[in-house]
Amino acid sequence: MTETQWLECISPELMLAYLGERASSRKRRLFACACVRRIWPLLRDDRLRQAVKVGERFADGRVPMKILEKAQRLARRLREEREAAELREATWMARAARSAAQAVEALLWEPEPILKQPRDIREPPDVVSATRTARAAARAAEAQRAQDESPRIEPIRRLHALDAVELVREIFGNPFRSVTLDPSWLCWKNNLIPKMARVIYRKRCFRNLSILADVLEEAGCNDTAILSHCRAQVEHARGCWVVDVVLNRA
């Protein structure tokens, strides 16, 4: 893959395959968590939401393996319950609920989240496919509820693919260009920039990334990639490559 192909790619699976082992386990898990957070309304059981948060904390080394394994067992049980419910009543919303639970289970997998497409239907689905299916099914359910005479339901395998592409670029950046920060920027005004980045990361205050860009610029940063990403009107996530560069996290 070339840089141009990376920037124009619309397949998250191809981009993840290109990154391969160069993407750290932490980054891969945070990407999986970010995918699932995009179907947050479909995780109606708070235990599934808590499981996603466990995955995020595990990625940052804040919880032990046994806690992750416990969350994974819970997610598997909840997924099985939703599969049984879907068999009893095969509705679009039941499919969305089951797919959402599958996505949570997949992000908690050991030794790393499932990001590769399965070879056959006997294998568990990858995070990207599960979240895409969940959102597509929910969209279909909404169309049915609207009682449209001819509802337009988009093909499940294509719906919202670009969202995952945006997340790949949000978290992994551009692998063809390395970005470094001048140490003087990080020391500027009593380490103000790293302090801001830590708050943004910990409290998920991604709306403050534009403010971080202003402060970086004031400190002397003129890197277009860094500043434009911070100011981009996109949905940022934990694992954002700019925040990770500032905090020196892989």
Image (cartoon, grey):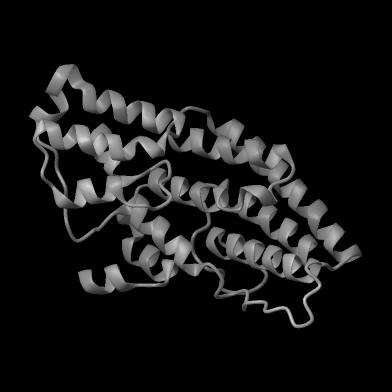
Q: Work out whether residue 206 or residue 149 is closer to the camera in this orientation and state it.
A: 149
* Quadrant holding the C terminus: top left
Q: Would you say 84 lies left or right of 139 here?
A: right
| Residue sitting at x 66%, y 36% | 70
Q: Position of residue 85 (x, y in %)?
A: 86, 58
* Quadrant holding the N terminus: bottom left
Q: Which image quadrant for residue 19?
A: bottom left
Q: Position of residue 110 (x, y in %)?
A: 54, 47
Q: Position of residue 61 (x, y in %)?
A: 44, 31
| Residue sitting at x 52%, y 47% | 33
Q: Would you say 241 lies left or right of 71 here?
A: left
How many numbered circles does the render carry? 0
Residue 59 shows in this picture: yes
Q: Is residue 93 above or below residue 72?
A: below
Q: Work out whether residue 159 or residue 80 is closer to the camera in this orientation and state it.
A: 159
| Residue sitting at x 79%, y 61% | 94
Q: Position of residue 181 (x, y in %)?
A: 14, 38
